[in-house]
Image (cartoon, rainbow, N blue to C red):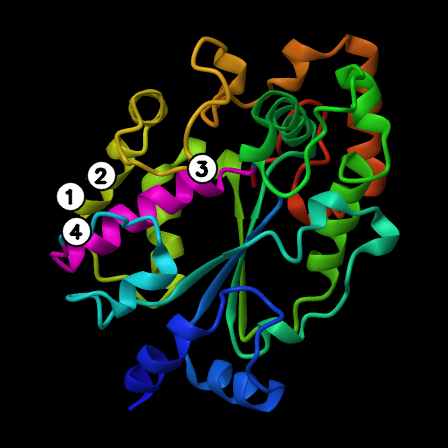
Amino acid sequence: MLRSLQKFLLPRIPAGAGNWAPDFMLSLYRRLSNDVCVVSYPCSGRTWLRLMLGYVLKSSANMTVKNFWDLHLLPFTKGGENLPRIILSHDDNVFIKTPAELSSDRSHYIGRKVIFLARDPRDLIISWYFDQLKRGDLSGVATFKTFGGSLEEFIDIERGSLATIFAFYNSWMGDHQDASDFLLMRYEDLHRQPEYELRRCLSFCGYGDVSDEVIAEAVKYAAFDNVRSIEENNTLGWDDFRPGDKADKQSYKTRHGKIGDHMNQLAPEKCQMLDHAVKTQLDPKFGYDVAGGRNIS
């Protein structure tokens, strides 16, 4: 019954907010559904996680679907009837806003599970700068191609930069009770133990019965070098997953994939400033309060 209702309604309802359905109908649906929302700031590793999840789900369900990265459509594709519906969100385009403009309305997530995918803001701001500077319209709604400033200057702007990241992270950590359940995932943990983190994510989504072999295959498929090759050759035919300029490695979505890149891109005194900002302005529950990296507990 529920899946039939989903199959009828969901292709007609956008994954984001602001659709035609009455609020009471959406609220009722969400309370009955098995939706999972992955919320993140851009450049936090969402594409990486998305490819791993899609690979696992289509492989486990023996699906032949081509666009397996469209996670929110997999349950409505032949063979995917038992899969969870996973929705990807940058939470009302937070990356084009100042801290004061961020919304605290979490009603869209009532009754849904939420995975918050975080990345060390020191590295995140580096990736976001190059994404905006080099990828232009491929990076999202906003473009900073007209910014024309340096990386150091970009870090200090109020709209969609470090201040917005801090406010966005703190807001979610402090207020996620509308979600039926909440899972914090971190980019750095995905690097350190990808199989464990992927399985933890799948279990949270209600799809934990996956073989070790499929998990390992998904991690191997989404490894940096393979995904860089996929992007370079447009193997997936995915419009947004391509470089701004094939000759410029900084314009790839798979630009670097390393932890601690901010220390290679910024002067030591600027890194110290970022360390202090993270320690004093970011909720310590994220575990990023140590100099130059994440606190592994």
Q: Which residues are magenta?
A: 44-63
Identify which residue, 107 or 248, lies in the foreground. 248
Q: Are marks 3 and 2 in contact (CB under 8 Å)?
A: no
* Position of the C terminus by quadrant: top right
Amino acid carrying label 3: it is Asp
Residue 197 percent location from the top left of the image: 40, 46
Element type at marker 3? loop
Q: Are marks 1 and 2 in contact (CB under 8 Å)?
A: yes
Residue at the disc numbered 3: 240
Q: How dense is the environment of label 1, judged by Cα within 10 Å: few (below 14), some, or many (20 and up)?
A: few
Residue at the disc numbered 1: 213
Q: How dense is the environment of label 4, judged by Cα within 10 Å: few (below 14), some, or many (20 and up)?
A: some
Residue 34 in view in this figure: no
Residue 222 percent location from the top left of the image: 31, 33
Identify which residue, 169 or 72, lies in the foreground. 72
Residue at the disc numbered 4: 59
3D distance between C-alphas at marks 2 and 4: 12 Å
3D distance between C-alphas at marks 3 and 1: 29 Å
Q: Are marks 3 and 4 in contact (CB under 8 Å)?
A: no
